[in-house]
Image (cartoon, grey):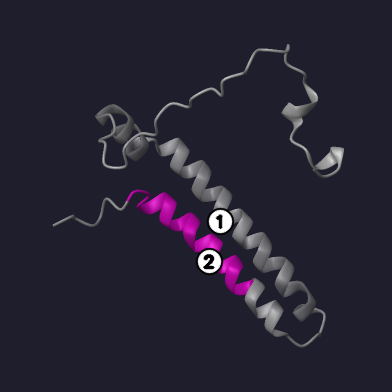
Amino acid sequence: MGSRLSLPFDSYIAAPPGTAAAPAKPAPPATPGAPTSPAEHRLLKTCWSCRMLSGLGLMGAGGYVYWVARKPMKMGYPPSPGTITKMVIGLSIATWGIIVMADPKGKAYRDV
């Protein structure tokens, strides 16, 4: 029932009569507790160029968000709650960039 637009796309493709198309069975998902390969884990912690690029990108994005939110205040408009929220979000994004550059995977904290 329903219009032709509400039917799934597969219903538009006609299968030959008498054949039933079996749905493909997806691969089982990886178990959440499965260990990752040591080479991959080490590479993510030691890739300085990746950390610098990501961190500087986040800092630039946060600075831009902060700057755009601050511009009306420099023109003399009083700050509104939305403007202050934008400034806080911009500072949060920039702080995230600093954290990515300094300690991206939580290496400074030891698991006990």
The N terminus sits in image quarter: top right
**Which residue corresponds to the image point at 52% horizontal and 42% vertical from the top-left?**
53
Residue at 57%, 48% in the rendered image: 57
Q: Amino acid at mark 2?
A: Ser
Q: Which residue is mark 1?
A: 59
Indicate whether 17 appears above or below 45.
Answer: above
Quadrant assignment for the C terminus: bottom left
Q: Which residue sits furthest left?
A: 112
Secondary structure at numbered mark 2: helix
Q: Quadrant of residue 5?
A: top right
Left or right relative to 62: residue 108? left
Q: Relative to the observer, which residue lies in front, 30 or 101?
A: 30
Residue 92 is covered by the magenta coloring: yes
Type of the residue with mark 1:
Met
**Image side of residue 43 versus residue 95, left or right:** left
Q: Position of residue 35 (x, y in %)?
A: 25, 35
Does the stretch in magenta take in 98? Answer: yes
SS type, badge 1 = helix
Mark drawn on residue 92 = 2
Instruction: Report x, y in % for residue 86.
Output: 66, 72
Mark 2–mark 1 distance (CA, rounded to whole Å): 9 Å
Q: Position of residue 39 (x, y in %)?
A: 28, 27
